[in-house]
Image (cartoon, rainbow, N blue to C red):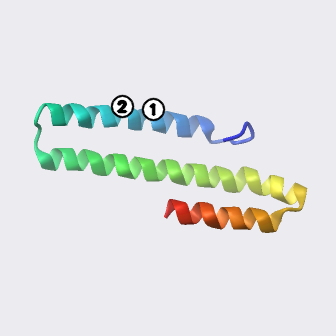
Amino acid sequence: MGSSHTKRKKVLNRLSRIEGHIRGIKKMIEEDRDCPDILHQIAAVKSSINKVGELVLEDHIESCLIDAVKEGSIEQYMDELKQAIKKLI
């Protein structure tokens, strides 16, 4: 993410929370906690990661579209955007 990206702080905060959540899941496994509880936490992490992906995509659309318009490279931007969306979903 370049310096013009406005959602950087939100993304970094969410990634830090996910990192802590992953450590918590690891500890649950080490402590031999119930599988349904562990799976519930894994589902929460997956959801959080999806939200991070959405934020990065939103930021890409908002900041990079402006640059593409200024540079006259809308077609290239659209191709990159399509590829980014395909990777996310």
Residue 45 x/y as whole percent: 35, 46
Query: Residue at image x 36%, y 51%?
Result: 46
Q: Is residue 27 left or right of residue 50?
A: left
Quarter assignment of residue 31:
top left
Instruction: Check whether the beta carbons of the residues at disc 2 and disc 1 lie within 8 A of each other.
Output: yes
Count of number-bearing discs: 2
Query: Residue at image x 71%, y 67%?
Result: 79
Label 1 Cα neighbours within 10 Å, binned few <14 / some 14-19 / many ≥20: few
Q: Amino acid at mark 1?
A: Ser
Label 2 Cα neighbours within 10 Å, binned few <14 / some 14-19 / many ≥20: few
Q: Amino acid at mark 2?
A: Gly
Q: Is residue 48 left or right of residue 39?
A: right
* Nearer to the camera, 50 or 86: 86
Under circle 1, the secondary element is helix
Q: Which mark is residue 62?
A: none
Residue 50 x/y as whole percent: 45, 53
Residue beneath disc 1: 16
Height in image: 10 above or below 86? above
Residue 3 x/y as whole percent: 73, 36
Query: Residue at image x 11%, y 38%?
Result: 33
Quarter assignment of residue 20:
top left
Residue beneath disc 2: 20
